[in-house]
Amino acid sequence: MAEVDLAIEGGTVVSATGRRQANILVTDGRVVHVGPERATARSTVDASGLIVLPGAVDTHVHLMDPGAPDREDFIAGTSAAAASGVTTILEHTHGHPIRTADDLRAKRSHLRDRALVDYGLAAHAWPDWGQDVAALWAAGVAFFKLFTCTTHGVPGHSAAQVLTHLDAAAATGALTLMHCEDESITEDAERVLRAAGRHDNAIIGEWRSREAELVGVTVAALLVRLTGAAATIAHVSHPAAAALITRERALGAALAAEACPQYFLLRETELHELGALRKFTPPARARHDHDEALMWSLLRDGTLTHMSSDHAPSTLAHKCDGDIWSVHFGLPGLDSTMSLLLDAVSRGELSLEDIVRVYSTSPARKYGLFPRKGQLAAGADADIVLVDPGHRRVLRNEDVLSKAGWTPYAGREVTGSVVRTYLRGELIAEAGKPLGSRNGRFLPGAGAHRSTAA
């Protein structure tokens, strides 16, 4: 074989369906061989004793850039991604939403030379605005984010408005990510709680209730089936919501179900003590270890189709700036998600193959990035993550690269650590530190590929 640019030799290469000891050969940013062959290489890495994974694909990320870069920007956020083994993100910011093809072009221009990893950009579905879904999809957005309740200043959709959007999405093949909490229930709960003068931390669970999520999921999932659209229910928080999605899937709905670590590892009662540091929505629902075990089982069996961080950071100062009603929703997650998944393997909750499936291959397939992303195979981008499976460490605020500067998992000991991350064959992070190269590329969504082919 001719000389290659990079050879990663002797590691255990993991796919969504198995693992084997193999060498990975890379030329011009692409994998050219995975198997026993060796070749002369400009750079050779001995991966003996290490796990070799395809780069993670995190499809629910908020980097606030432009909009609120004091909370997060693309440089800090993608630094956290790179160090954590995430080589592709799909991003949307609520503070400066994309609603038109011109908005998309402007954001692409703003982000030039600001990303350490590859990225796609999502649009926001906007009710009562005459949005041209087809034009945005053809322009290359990754998906449309739709809320069924007003959140982060983005207006919620009524059932009729959801139907209008999904009809348009189905007609053009566009994908939608749906945040499901019923607006009538959350509005009424807020009115009652404010009238009672409530400002205690427990209001979050009563305001953004299980009932609001279940009604939102039920209506959204039904409308996905009736319209024939393809959609993902975002951040499914508990098994009852997953069961509703399963029911509609069985009837023919093209529905994915997104998981996030906070709905496995954080507990509902933490909100009472920690307040704003546990203010995200839907809130944590797990009350005990049995609830967590059920969520892991749903991820293993594919009911929950993929994992995302829902990285929505605010600094500690932001989280202290106001009462529980007014402080920002959201948690940082890019720094920690891969570590938490690797630790789940050490605890027997997942396999390494599960990690590849839920945090790489499945999201890449869902959002039209596969086969270039989401696998290590000839022809794929050489997005490669080397993992030390036995390395133990404690997650600390001091190690967070996101501008948030903190993690809700501080003090948690985890097993398994990313030691190197490659993007298209280039080393972009090592030993938890990004190397600073801003060579991340914009990835047009599936609609742009279709319109070009047409």
Image (tube, helix red, strand yellow):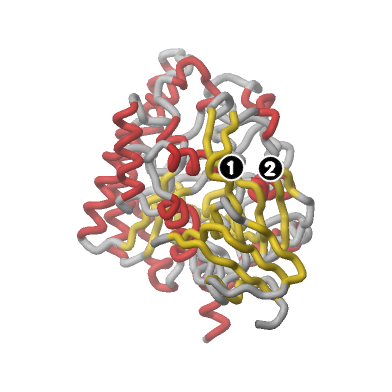
Q: Is residue 91 visible?
A: no
From the image, which quarter does the N terminus lie in? bottom right
Sequence-wise, the earlier of marks 2 and 1 is 1
Circle 1 packing at 10 Å, graded few (<14), some (14-19), many (20+), is many
Between 46 and 123, the one lying in front of the other is 46
Callout count? 2
Q: Identify the residue at image location x=66%, y=58%.
A: 46
Residue 111, image x, y percentages: 74, 57
Q: CA distance from mark 2 to mark 1?
A: 9 Å
Nearer to us in this view, 37 or 179: 37
Q: Is residue 425 above or below residue 154?
A: below
Q: Position of residue 248 (x, y in %)?
A: 24, 55
Residue 256 in the figure: left or right of residue 310: left
The residue at the point 70 percent across, 29 percent down is: 398
Find residue 170 and report its image quarter. Answer: bottom left
Q: Is residue 72 left or right of residue 295?
A: right
The residue lying at 35 percent from left, 41 percent from top is: 296
Q: Residue at x 69, y 44 (%)?
A: 431
Residue 341 position within the rendered picture, expressed as x and y whole percent measured from the top left: 48, 43
**Up-down relation of residue 276 to residue 438 (above or below):** above
Q: Which residue is mark 2?
A: 432
Disc 1 residue type? Ser
- Labels 2 & 1 near each other (Cβ < 8 A): yes
The label on residue 303 is: none
Q: Nearer the viewer, residue 166 or 389?
A: 389
Picture coordinates of residue 181 (x, y %)?
A: 38, 40
Element at label 2: loop
- Name the residue tied to disc 1: 417
Residue 194 found in image quarter: top left
Badge 2 amino acid:
Gly
Q: Is residue 190 above or below residue 31?
A: above
